Amino acid sequence: MRALAVVMMVWGAACDAEPSASRDRCAAAEARCGALGREVCSDGQWVEAACESDSVCVEGMCKGVGRDFFAVMLDDSVQLAASATDPCVQSAASPGADIDAVALYDGGTLIGYLEHVRFAPSALCPDNQFVDGDQAVGAPDASAAGGFVALGGGTLVGDFGAGVQIHEGYTIEVLARDEGPPGCALDCGPAYSIYVTSALDCTRTRPDCRTVLLADRGVGPTEVVVPAL
């Protein structure tokens, strides 16, 4: 695997002074990533590179950054945290968006539904009773009794089968049960964000994953077309 330059910068006077020996950020991890052990002058800065330009240093290892998208990520932590009312009190058993299924389409052709998922529940709503991420696998089958996963501030990541890539122009359809209470406006149910990401084990902040936000306010059943990314 080619290594990305995790670069640590120490500003110099146009590089005419000796570089500082100080390494305050990620020094130990970069050392394990095979730091060069020397500094070079680049664009007026003293820099020391640990990894090459298409990977990052993660827990002491150089890891390539994924460029293609193979998974969908759903998260409602931002929306729940910003809610004017306590969503855990409103629906303690199934707080937040209730995700029944997610489908992937190429035009009008169904490619498939989620086949593998990972769900990370949140401590935000500890009484959430619907935390089995596998309930979002396959075709829609939810009822009031179950068959869905309640996000409740957590994060659901799923793919559509081994090697199935999410391309520009594809449509992602999130089949969420929530459309708000009777008589409310279309957009007043529990909202959630939709992302595409590099792999099933990605998180929003993992540096070797490429995660891109597609929609920050999905409500109920929501479709989004994957743009050029």
Image: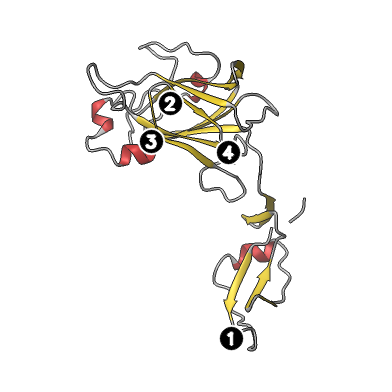
Give the number of the disc on residue 153.
3
CB under 8 Å between discs 3 and 4:
no
Q: Which residue is mark 4?
A: 197
Nearer-the-camera pick, 176 or 126: 176
Quadrant showing the C terminus: top right
Whichever of callouts 3 and 4 sits on the residue coming sooner in the sequence is: 3
CB under 8 Å between discs 2 and 1:
no
Q: Disc 1 residue type?
A: Ala
Whole-Å distance between the Cαs marked 4 and 2? 21 Å
Nearer-the-camera pick, 156 or 174: 174
Residue at the bottom extreme, as displayed: 17
Report the residue at 24% width, 27% height from top: 90
Select label 1 or label 3 by which is in front.
Answer: 1
Could you say where residue 74 lies in the image, as x and y percent from the top left?
Answer: 47, 32
Q: Disc 2 residue type?
A: Val
Whole-Å distance between the Cαs marked 2 and 1? 55 Å
Whole-Å distance between the Cαs marked 3 and 2? 11 Å
Report the residue at 35% width, 21% height from top: 178
Q: Disc 3 residue type?
A: Gly
Select label 4 or label 2 by which is in front.
Answer: 4
Q: Could you classify mark 2 by the number of other residues whose Cα lies within 10 Å: few (under 14), some (14-19), or many (20 or more)? A: many
Whichever of callouts 4 and 2 sits on the residue coming sooner in the sequence is: 2
What kind of element bears circle 4? strand
Select label 3 or label 2 by which is in front.
Answer: 3
Whole-Å distance between the Cαs marked 1 and 3? 47 Å
The relative height of residue 137 versus residue 21 in the rendered view (above or below) is above
CB under 8 Å between discs 4 and 2:
no
Q: Which residue is mark 2?
A: 131
Q: Which residue is mark 1?
A: 13
